[in-house]
Amino acid sequence: AIRVTPPVGSFGSTTSLRFASDARAGNVTTLSLAFSPYMTIVPNEFVVLKLPGFVRKADFSFRGATISRASMSSDSVVLTFGRQINPGDAVLVQLLGLALPDIGVQVNQTSIKISTNATAGPVPPVALNYVQGVGSFTNTG
């Protein structure tokens, strides 16, 4: 019998999320997401970035030549691709109009995850390889 193995995608250790140099907990900043898929991502497939505690503001937008649409629902940003991304292509997307969590962001925070529905190799939600930390001062009473 011939077994059919479903494709499995990967971003390897290429995923990173960085913030503008003036980023502060609770404030709006620019997020820069970078990754390089190990599989093809075709137009209308998407990547989801789970951002717990981040808040979308009215002026939410994006910059990225490969992205045709970005939307946010609950705590996730959905990035829809407008053109094909080939294995090894470097993708950089900037997200504008999101406020960081009031409690800040831990370095390599594992609750921030990336996934894709790419037919050539779907990726379930996995932690990013690098997440920049942004500290906060909390009122301890």
Image (cartoon, grey):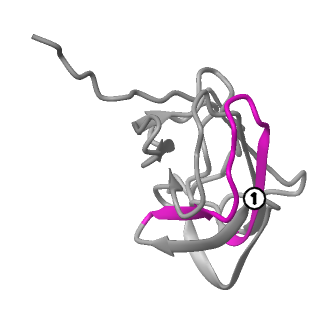
123 is higher (above) or lower (below) than 117 = above
28 is higher (above) or lower (below) than 1 = below
Please state which amino acid type lies under the numbered disc 1.
Thr
Residue at the location (58% across, 52% down)?
42
Q: Nearer the viewer, residue 139 or 134?
A: 134
Could you say which quadrant of the image residue 29 lies in? bottom right
In the rendered image, the residue lying farthest to the bottom is 58
Q: Is residue 96 highlighted in magenta?
A: yes
Residue at the location (47% across, 37% down)?
120
Residue corresponding to mark 1: 66
Residue range of the region highlighted in magenta in the rendering: 75-98
* Residue 49: image location, x then y, percent: 53, 52
Quarter holding the N terminus is top left
Residue at the location (67% across, 65% down)?
82
* Residue 77: image location, x then y, percent: 53, 63
* Residue 71: image location, x then y, percent: 55, 74
> What is the number of callouts on the image?
1
